[in-house]
Amino acid sequence: MKPIEILSAIPEWAKASPEDILASPAWAMPCRLGEEQCVMRPADVRPAETLDLAIRLGEEDHVLGIADSPMFAEIHSIWTSRADVPEPMLIAMVEKDCGAFLQLLENVARRQLRIIGLSQESAPRTDAQMLFAQVSSQGETATFSLDLTPAIIAEFGKLRNIDTTHETVRGFQLPAEREYAVFTMPDGDLATLAPGDEVLIPEAETIPPRIVAARLFSLSGNGVAPWKDDGLLRVCAAEGSTVSLGELLDAAAGTQPQPIPPPKENEPLNLVRNGRTVASGHFAGLAGHPSFSVDASRLAR
């Protein structure tokens, strides 16, 4: 499975709003600055001063704040005296010096960008109304601010712009079950299970255990695959566990996961069908073969 397929299958991520995605520290939007591929990310430090431009993106008016950066050499050279530069000359310098950056913004916003002039807006905006971001190229970083509108939030706040290598994503925990065997049993036999019964589970010898994560994915030595409950009986560890999203992503990328150990003697187990525990017991052996030893039936009599 691809990282975006895994992320899209997890409700907490799939249902995240564009605002939530854009506010995430894992937000990372692929872009191109000139001929170089780069990534737009949340700004490490919000700039104390910016050169504020009134721009138009498509049909929307915005304020773009450009921070001082050696990436924009001419603007950088007159930064402390920029207030003394006539506006037409300053705008011409921005268009020449920041052309590749402005093209980048135009491309990621999917809207034509036009500079109107220096911004005359004086009313402060809240952080929730602003994007503070940065892009880096050849060791230099450009930091900027942009006021947000629903259209820009929707364009920038897409799930595909989440960096699945970020620690906040990799550390996301999913509930998990250690599954030791899967088999069928006639309903009549299942209904008569009683304490002391032994159910042979040869699968525990022949098929490696796997992890079922959030009832969405199966994790085994073969990697990660979508999981769907097919209504079969499943022998699972009674003790719940968790698996990190990072572990799933690593396994999906081909990193060999740690093998899941087989059940230990007398390990508490549950017999599960359709998400419901139908019997509890422990791991045992019958005539030298692994078995599920029933301690209690959960089925109504």
Image: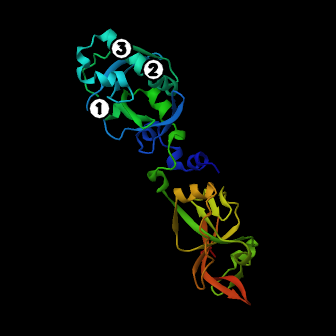
Q: CA distance from mark 3 to mark 1?
A: 26 Å
Residue positioned 58% across, 74% down in the render: 237
Identify which amino acid the numbered label 1 is placed on: Thr
**Location of mark 3 (residue):** 91
Q: Residue at x 53, y 49 (%)?
A: 11
Q: Secondary structure at mark 1?
A: loop
Q: Classify mark 3: helix, strand or loop.
A: helix
Where does the image place residue 159, in percent across and percent down from the top left?
52, 40
Assign the C terminus to one quadrant of the image. bottom right
Q: Which amino acid lies under the numbered mark 3 shown in the image of this protein? A: Ile
Residue, disc 1: 126
Q: CA distance from mark 2 to mark 1?
A: 28 Å
Return the disc, 2 or 1, that comes first in the chain's sequence. 2
Local crowd size for mark 1, using a 10 Å CA cut-off: few (<14), some (14–19), many (≥20) = few
Give whichever of discs 3 and 1 has the lower sequence position: 3
Question: Percent position (x, y) of residue 192?
Answer: 70, 79
